[in-house]
Image: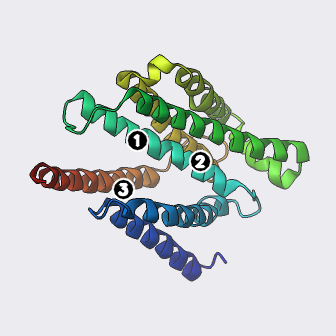
Amino acid sequence: YLTPTFFLIRAMVYIGLWLVLALLLSRRGEAGDHPKISAVGLVIYMLTVSFSSVDWIMSLERHWYSTIYGVVLVSAQGIGAFSLALLLTYRLRIRGEDSNEEIGTKEKADLGNLLLMLVIFWAYITFSQFLIIYYGNLPEEATWYVARTSGAWGWVALALVFFHFILPFILLLSRARKQNPFGMTRVASLLIAMYFLDILWLVVPSFDAQSGWVPILALWVTIGMGGIWTFVLTHRVRIQRPMESLS
């Protein structure tokens, strides 16, 4: 299953499907197209992220496995993506660059509640995985958590508990904060930072369980992919805005 050829074929399938979904959702079509694409895309997304998380992250330690590992990554990506969407939306409105209708009070509350739900779901799934492995106390399973709760990684785990769940949970309980674009951008920024920290916590100990050294190659790949994504996003936004102004 993890032979290089089959591994690369699956990777190209995952990335190809994600690109097709992104292009379909970003194009200007009929009003009813996007919900239909999203419904089908959600199923494809769940399956591809589950399989890719096993291929790209869990396979780094081949003797360790988790039956809900894919769901853990899906919930984390949900928080990261929705936080980024909220951050961009509110920042554009704060700077006066979004000419669309103002987000109503109910809509602001709904957006904040949805983010709160995603945070709770991530904490529930993550803790469920930990509790099952802790209760079973099998060496081949517990070793994965020992590497991520020892030394400096133990402090990272505590930071994720506090800043990825407890603090956002408390902040998002406030209705006034959910109505405040400045407050929501701060919460969204915190969750985006914690998402990247969570990925480091999942990946890096697989290479060196005793230190917090981040491979330079991984850092440059992150910067490179992030730069390409940012360029494509800003380019498409600049194209769509003149089209919207003419319509």
Asked if marks 3 and 1 touch (Cβ < 8 Å), the reply is no
Q: Quadrant of the N terminus?
A: bottom right
Give SS at disc 1.
helix
Say which residue label 1 marks: 84
Label 1 is placed on what type of residue?
Leu
**Real-space CA distance between mark 2 and mark 1, rounded to the nearest whole angstrom:** 14 Å
Left or right placement of residue 93 versus residue 147 in this view? left
In the drawing, what numbered circle is on residue 225? 3
Give SS at disc 2.
helix
Image location of residue 43, percent across then percent down: 56, 64
Residue at 60% of width from left, 29% of height from top?
Answer: 159
Picture quarter containing residue 163?
top right
The foreground one among 32 and 12 is 32
In the drawing, what numbered circle is on residue 75? 2
Label 3 is placed on what type of residue?
Met
**Badge 2 or badge 3: first in the primary sequence:** 2
